[in-house]
Structures are given as C-alpha cells and as structure tokens.
Image: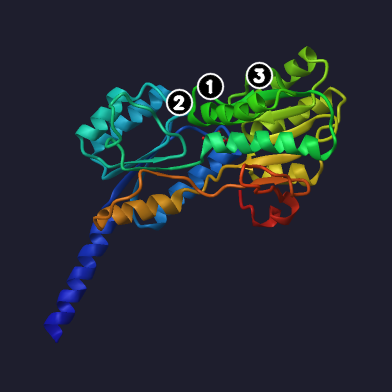
Amino acid sequence: MKKILVLILALTMMVGVASAELKVAFSQIGQESDWRTANTDDVKKAIVDAGWELIYDDAQQKQENQVKALRNFITQGVDYIVFTAIVTTGWDDVLAEVKEAEIPLILIDRLPETSFGNDDWYTCYFGGDFPFEGYKAGMWVKNYFESIGHKGDINIVRLSGTTGSDPQIGRTKGFDEVVAANPNMKIVYDQTGNFTRAEGQAVMEAALKAVPKIDVLWAENDDMALGAIEAIKAAGKVPGKDIIIIGCDAVKAAFEAIVAGEMNATSECTPLMGARVVEVIKGLEAGQTFDKVVHPVEYVYDMNGGIVIDDDGNVSLKAADHINERLY
Ligand code: GZL
C-alpha cells in the first residue's frame, strides 16, 4: 500500500512539474483599443493561472516587431506560440521557421495568410467572424432606418480599421454586401481610423467638413466611434440623433454611450480568448486535436433591441439589459 501511495505522489509531482515547465509565448499587436487591452489581459491571465511560464511581446503596432518576437520565441525554445497578426500578409518566412521548429502555433483574433497552400502550419484559430460582424452591422442600419420609416438615401460615413488587417477586410466585406443589396445605402466617405479613438476623431472632423449630409457613422470598432462622437459634438451636432452611430466590438464604453443616447448600436466581437488558449494547450498536451477554425457566438446591442440583424431573423439586444455583465 505504501509503495502505491509513493508512486501516486511521484506521478502527481511529475505531472505538476511538467505542466509548470510549459513555456507559452504570446505575440500581441499593441494597445490600440479597449478591446485589445481586454484581449491582452484575459489571455495573459489565463496562461499564468494555468501555472505556465508566459513569454509576452507587445509589438506596438509594428509587423516587424512581431516577426522579431516570433524569431525570439523560436530561439528561446518555447513550447507553444499564441499569435494574432496585425495584418494578413507578409508572414511566410517567419511562419515557415515556426513550423520548421515544430512549435505548435495557436492563432487568436486576427488570422494571417500564407502562400503555403495548406493549413497544417497552425494548430487552430479562435476569433471573430469578421465578415458576419460587418454584415450584421449593415443589416442593423438597413432595418433600423426601415423601422423609423426613413425614405430616400442613407448617407454613410465609414471609419475602417487598420488597413489590411483581418477585421478591417472582413467587416468592410460584410457591410458592403448589405450596401450592394440596398441601393439607397450610400458610402459617402470612407477612411481608416486605424482602430484608435484619436484617429477616429480626426477622420470624423474631416468627414463633417467634406460631407454636407451624414445620416450614419459606421465605425469598424467602438474606439473610433467614441472618438468620432467628440468630433460630432464639436461640430454642433447631436451624436445618436443627428447622426446614427454603429460601432463594432461591444466594449463597455460603447454600452455606456448607447445608454447615454450618444451612440445607437454595436456589433459584438469578444476579446475573451484566454480560456480557449488554455483548453487547446491542455488538450494538445493530452494528445487531442482541434477544429481549425472556431468562432464565438456574437450579438448586436442597441438602444431598444428588436432590430433584425441577419437572414435568420435574429434581432438586436437592448444594451441597457446587458451593461452590468460587460466586464471590459
Ligand atoms: C478584432 C480585433 C480588432 C478590434 C479592435 O478581433 O482585431 O482590433 O475590433 C482592435 O478594437 O483594435
């Protein structure tokens, strides 16, 4: 009996030590938005809470810094790499080196593209369905204006995200599908605000000077919408009334603006990816395999709920009913 207890204790200690020795590297884009901060905090906390060693790099919005970080991770001999790519292209060489080093690559948030012709260079991806997020935003605009009996054109200003990033490409594509199907929806001004409040405010200032009549602001993230609201106020207009504003991400600051009447809707994109990262690493350690691409369920939140947002007839949810559960 004593021998069995000693064996169980030894095995427990071995598993414990093995798990603590895992080195998990995380290449993050930067700190450009509330969404990014929530994403960083959630993933870092999950890795540390799992008892693993975290090697973290903040690329400060520069692709070249992410390439350097990935090469450093290889040199350090990490066990896993968690990676979100600031833009979709320009990764072939370094991702080939990661594959060569046989380090499992767990993709979150933004997907990079490669010319490898297969998908065996990464383990799995978890992140928003960006075209669908944009599509739902477009459907919300279409159906909201129908619900208030609007007649005639709907003049839309678009603040797009970081040019060439997966969410910018996807959200623009999805929203444009709705515009193509509804000739009264007109994109009258279209510039990147690079997912930041400051640039969103600056671009909206220019749009207000250039466009005589703006009905809608569609911002591809909430931070740009919140920056634009300051420009709209400075121009003597009432945000949420003179100009209907829909953002993307569904961060708490957007819920607060909607409840305050200064914003009208936001298409959700969850930043909470830490649990999935830990689930995948623990599963891989136990020999499991995973679906290549997994998207979380995501909603649209607005002033009153009830606006149809997709082809299945799903409707928006009232932001005020969900603001207390929003932790970021
Ligand atoms: C989307 C994410 C985007 C957010 C922005 O998954 O990559 O980057 O929508 C963030 O807020 O800057």
In this rendering, would 170 be left or right of 77? right
What SS does tag 2 mark?
loop
Q: Amino acid at mark 2?
A: Val
Front in this rendered view, residue 112 or 66: 112
Q: Which residue is mark 3?
A: 190
Q: Which residue is mark 2?
A: 87
Q: Which residue is mark 1?
A: 163
Residue furthest bottom as drawn: 1
Q: Position of residue 235 (x, y in %)?
A: 84, 22
Q: Amino acid at mark 1?
A: Thr
Mark 2 or mark 3: whose residue is earlier in sequence: 2
Q: Position of residue 325 (x, y in %)?
A: 65, 57
In percent of the image, x 45 and y 47: which residue is there? 43
Looking at the image, is 322 positioned above or below residue 10?
above
In percent of the image, x 70 and y 38: which residue is there? 140
In percent of the image, x 69 and y 55: which residue is there? 322
| Disc 1 + disc 2, Cβ < 8 Å | yes
In which quadrant is the N terminus drawn? bottom left
- Local packing at callout 1 (Cα closer than 10 Å; few below 14, some 14-19, many 20+) is some
